[in-house]
Amino acid sequence: MADALTLLIRDADCVVTMDDQRRELVRASIRVRGAAIEAIGPAATVGTEADEVIDARGHVVTPGLVNTHHHMFQSLTRAIPAAQDAELFGWLRTLYPLFARLTPEMVHVSTQVAMAELLLAGCTTSSDHLYVFPNGVRLTDSIEAATAIGMRFHAARGSMSVGESAGGLPPDSLVEDERTILADTRSLIEQHDDRGRYAMLRVVAAPCSPFSVSRDLMRETAVLARSLGARLHTHLAENDHDVAYSRQHFGMTPAQYAESLGWLGDDVWHAHCVKLDAAGITRFLGGPFDPREDDGLIASGLDRHPEISLLAPRHVIAPVLDDTQRAIFDEDACHFSGGLAIGLLFRGRYGNEVSVDVAHERPLLFAGCD
Ligand SMILES: [Zn+2]
């Protein structure tokens, strides 16, 4: 890395380090060599020469935000009148026919649109959960888009295998054969997953949700991903209908369901989880999860967060990073405004004792307000 290009961000009014001491350095500079920060501190100590110099006077510099959950293809299906004011299942049933018309070009374009929005909002690393593959769509369509735009990317190979005729929510035309899903997931991880320190691309195994994939696929996906050192991602406990589906079809709560399948651990992150029960929250606090502002937007709920704050008084742990599904629900994709909104929601409901903190030590960050 000694001959890698250098970047100097100099003379910022403030550099927000987000280190353990939460230091905020006044009139500070940052020197980057290749992909690594090699110096940060008072401007006079960091030097003035570099291959590229950015004058940051008048600016605040923060670490790049990390977006833990997105469906970038849905950037193309915003503001559909029939999906407005719908709860999750109704929203999905309205949009599935549109998702069925997705093409490789649409995935490429929508991924770049979503990433441009994220980058403009200060996000430098994003996951994307792509779970529909009609008309020749492949995960590599989004990977190529990310590579072209230059964003650090966790590409999640989503999947749906249980269609309406088998008791699932999606139409049969949008589900895939489970052997095909597993073979493609293996191939993608083997070809594209970079486990290096400064990797720009990881591949994640990500069956979509309890109401769209089988228990067998969940189990086999976990075994496959772990054999290859890849991470796991899915939706869980997203709203009351989601919970009812788990109880009806599996005879257990979402948290029990996830645990029974081997889907808890440091290599798993779940989206939503706003409807975990108290026992589930206690179980999940051992690992990352990701409730978000958009759950409020589609009225899925916030009502299990009191237990979280009770377990960690005065703080709501690791909520929100990622408000980026706001983009899907016809909003913008600004993490800062999302962080502010979630903080105000919690504070309005639970009082000023609640603060929303940055869970900087976790792989899924963000974003607070206070
Ligand atoms: Zn989602």
Image (cartoon, rainbow, N blue to C red):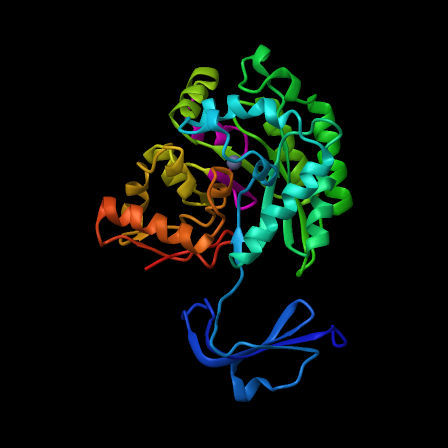
The residue drawn where x is 32% and y is 41% is 305
Residue 276 lies in quadrant: top left
Give the magenta-colored segment's residue range: 252-271
**In this view of the protein, which residue sits in the foreground, 137 or 1?**
137
Q: Quadrant of the N terminus?
A: bottom right
Position of residue 333 relative to residue 198, above or below, is above
Magenta region includes residue 77: no
Q: Is residue 110 left or right of residue 330?
A: right
- Please, which residue is most extreme toward the top here? 165
Residue 155 lies in quadrant: top right
**How far across and down, in percent of the image, does residue 143 sit?**
71, 45
The residue drawn where x is 70% and y is 57% is 196
Residue 268 lies in quadrant: top right
Position of residue 200 relative to residue 348, above or below, is below
**How far across and down, in percent of the image, does residue 264 sit?**
51, 38
Q: Is residue 343 left or right of residue 211?
A: left
Number of marks in picture: 0
Q: Is residue 132 left or right of residue 15?
A: right
**In this view of the protein, which residue sits in the foreground, 325 or 263?**
325
Position of residue 105 relative to residue 160, above or below, is below
**How far across and down, in percent of the image, does residue 30 sit?**
56, 76
**How far across and down, in percent of the image, does residue 248 sit?**
43, 16
Q: Quadrant of the C terminus?
A: bottom left
Residue 119 seen in the current view: yes
The residue drawn where x is 53% and y is 54% is 66
Residue 155 seen in the current view: no
